[in-house]
Image: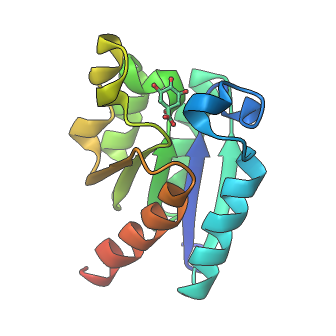
Amino acid sequence: MSPHRTVLLLSGPNLNMLGLREPEVYGVETLDDHVAVATATAEAHGFELRHFQSNHEGELVDLIHAARGNHEAIIINAGAFTHYSWSIHDALAVFDGPIVELHLSNPERRESWRSTSVISPVAHGIICGFGGVGYRLAVEAVVELLSRR
Ligand code: DQA
């Protein structure tokens, strides 16, 4: 375990394009803006937040493996991998702490193919549809889940 209590925030494909990407769906804030909110929320609760963004499935799998024993919880917005990445599902299943699935939009209100999440079966909870506020809510959710342990 790291000397600090840390939470890992993972961002999947295309989230590096936030701000430019379909602002009518995802808003005008950048990923850095959301990470700043998550970081400040974590610090207010005595946690350090580490963030990684990747457009590559295997890289996310490696980061999830490395989280075991190093981070207390994972918050993951897996982007489109949410809907079909069984390798991310399987990697998360090995993690031993709380997992919160996060989305800016509410996938249930969008195209039908977004209604399938392969992350949900291995997540403790889901935060979606609140835009950037979800980053604060997700950190608060993991703090709450960790306080119950
Ligand atoms: C998303 C929703 C996904 O369906 C989509 O592929 C994304 C972003 C969200 O944050 O709303 O990339 O995860």
**Count of numbered marks:** 0
Residue 48 figure quarter: bottom right
Q: Is residue 81 left or right of residue 17?
A: left
Residue 8 figure quarter: bottom right
Question: Quick one: 118 or 108, which is closer to the camera?
Answer: 108
Question: Quick one: 113 or 19, which is closer to the camera?
Answer: 19
- Residue 38 lies, in percent from the top left, at 61, 65
Picture layout, residue 95 above or below residue 122 = below
- Residue 96 lies, in percent from the top left, at 33, 57
Q: Is residue 26 left or right of residue 32?
A: left
Residue 21 figure quarter: top right
Question: How is the protein colored in the picture?
Answer: rainbow
Question: Quick one: 74 or 23, which is closer to the camera?
Answer: 23
Identified at 33% across, 34% down, the residue is 119
Identified at 59% across, 36% down, the residue is 26
Identified at 43% across, 30% down, the residue is 88
Question: Quick one: 114 or 143, which is closer to the camera?
Answer: 114
Q: Quadrant of the N terminus?
A: bottom right
Res 70 seen here:
no
Q: Quadrant of the C terminus?
A: bottom left
Res 123 seen here:
yes
- Residue 71 lies, in percent from the top left, at 52, 64
- Residue 93 lies, in percent from the top left, at 30, 41
Q: Is residue 124 left or right of residue 59?
A: left
Identified at 63% across, 82% down, the residue is 43
